Image: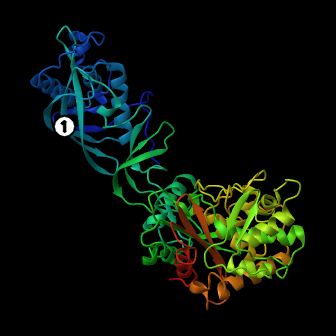
Amino acid sequence: MNRAVKIGIAGTSTALLVLGGIGTYNIVHGLVSGSAGDDTSQAARGFDPSAVSSTPPSGAEAKKLTRAFLDTWSQQHLDGAASDTDVPDAASQALRDYARGLHLEKLSFDHILDAGPSSVTQGATKVTFDVTARVAGGTWSYQSAVAVRKSTNGQLAVHWNNSVLYPGLGDGQSLTAGKLPPGSAGAKVVASDGRTDLSRFASLRGIAATIGKNAKATGGSPGTGVAVVDGDGAGVETLKVFSKGRPATVRTTIDAGLQSAAERAVKDTHLQRKPAGTVALDWRNGHILAIAHTGDDGDIAINGIKSPGSTMKIVTAAALFDRAGLTPSSPAPCTDSLTANSQLFHNDSGVRPNPGSSLAQAFTVSCNTSFIKDGFHYLVHDGDASALHDEAVNVFGLGSWSIGGGVATTDPSIPADVEGGDQAAQFIGQGKVTATPLVMASVAATVRNAGFEQPVILPGQHQETAPRPLSARTAGYLQSMMRGVATSGTAAPRLGGLAGVGAKTGTAEEGDHTNGWLTAYNSRISVAALVEGGSSGVDSAGYVVRRLLTGG
């Protein structure tokens, strides 16, 4: 790797013959401090940097000095060029570092033009010019500019900063030419097939950029060109490419085909342009296969934290099985309404009362009052309503995850210390209970896998485990009930007829509107979707989930 010398650090000179566009000079001679030209320096002529005039020099004056400065620089008489600036010592060292870092062979300037008063440097006149540099690997051309100031005694000087070398070059940065340094071109983040660039998917562009910056890339070969590097030689930005290299890659768990289906699904015409988000997982290992979203509120698939509604009844049912010993056939009367802790709860429209309902039947039709009644009776003791939190965290693994690559996700909330009406609301996924489609896809995956596998987007990444396993008994009960929801329950209008599918719908109240949820699994994937403003889970999120389960 060709590593540029950091500006401000002295080094040895290089013997190269340089032919300037404005003049010709031998580098070996020109880099010798104190050679011809020092007697005409601005310092000798009396420029006073402590007494700068507030009146900019005329365009003709500024252009004349700039031409002299560039002429001397093109001849590689660097001390002489530096003496035309307001800080000769710093400028001299920076010009040397420019030549060394680029392995400069030839330098010329053209189109030197007065650009009027500088908008950046007060009391200065701006002069623009074109630069052509023959450097290691090829020829590089760019536009640059200087600001010329005048001191109160009438003497002029080029105002020095690193932008004279290249516009926007910062302190501690330098230029290098030849083999491009690591970091000057981002890594290519690809799907699990090792080929498909994730940036081609609208929903994954931000995620791909984040992973490219944070994850370790492998393979690849550097190209050649010109780049900005920091003080440690790491690439900051590629300015010119002479020959393309092959970028290093970061392979993710994303399934390119399923991601394409997810991008289409969140734009399903049945949603009427409502914001939607969806996540698909491989339930066997927690690998994230697809993330897609629409809307203006960011990525609602992994950060859209909302009340999950009746999809949370999966966890409530599990708690009733594990902590109270209930079974799917246990009584769970479904009434029109129910008052709990002085708060009145109703069922969604279409849910018929059934005093003789079992827990499985209540789950199939999504009866709120059944789950609130059983939840209060079996899971709240002496004001302690932490049983749902315990089941969610310790069995379903819901907590603080890192899916990998620096990608931010929003943690779910199932509080352990709920009070008042929230003690009842939590059992139907309302109150202070919140989740994202990523979280609810994981809940469905835990049921189908009969155990929690933490979602990840990078293969081989560490995965957190749940403190307690999901029992085979509870997993079997939940799978049976979720199958009933898909075949004859609330999800049947969208998922009925699909082989091996288990599901749970949800409709959550939020302010003056509702959000539609649905989470499901088949023989290969688990998926959850959220549609903001959806009137019901099946008639909004149901369309998204079906397309993913069928690959369309």
Which residue shows up at 35% across the image and 42% down it? 103
* Residue 238 in the image: above or below residue 233: below
Q: Quadrant of residue 353?
A: bottom right
Residue 463 appears anywhere in the view = no
Which residue shows up at 59% across the image and 53% down it? 406
Find the residue positioned furthest to the left: 60
* Residue 526 in the image: above or below residue 62: below
* Location of residue 395 in the rendering, given as x and y in whole percent from the top left corner: 80, 65
Position of 16 with respect to 429 (left or right) is left
In terms of depth relative to the viewer, which is nearer, 8 or 502? 502
Q: Disc 1 marks which residue? A: 129
Q: Quadrant of residue 470?
A: bottom right
* Location of residue 439 in the rendering, given as x and y in whole percent from the top left corner: 65, 64
* Location of residue 454 in the rendering, given as x and y in whole percent from the top left corner: 71, 64
Which residue shows up at 69% across the image and 65% down it? 345
Q: Quadrant of residue 151?
A: top left
**Is disc 1 surrounded by few (<14), some (14 to 19) or many (20+) residues within 10 Å?**
some
Position of 325 with respect to 77 (left or right) is right
Give the residue type at disc 1. Answer: Phe
In terms of depth relative to the viewer, which is nearer, 544 or 178? 544
* Location of residue 106 in the rendering, given as x and y in whole percent from the top left corner: 25, 41
In terms of depth relative to the viewer, which is nearer, 260 or 70? 260
* Residue 120 in the image: above or below residue 393: above
The secondary structure type at the circle numbered 1 is strand
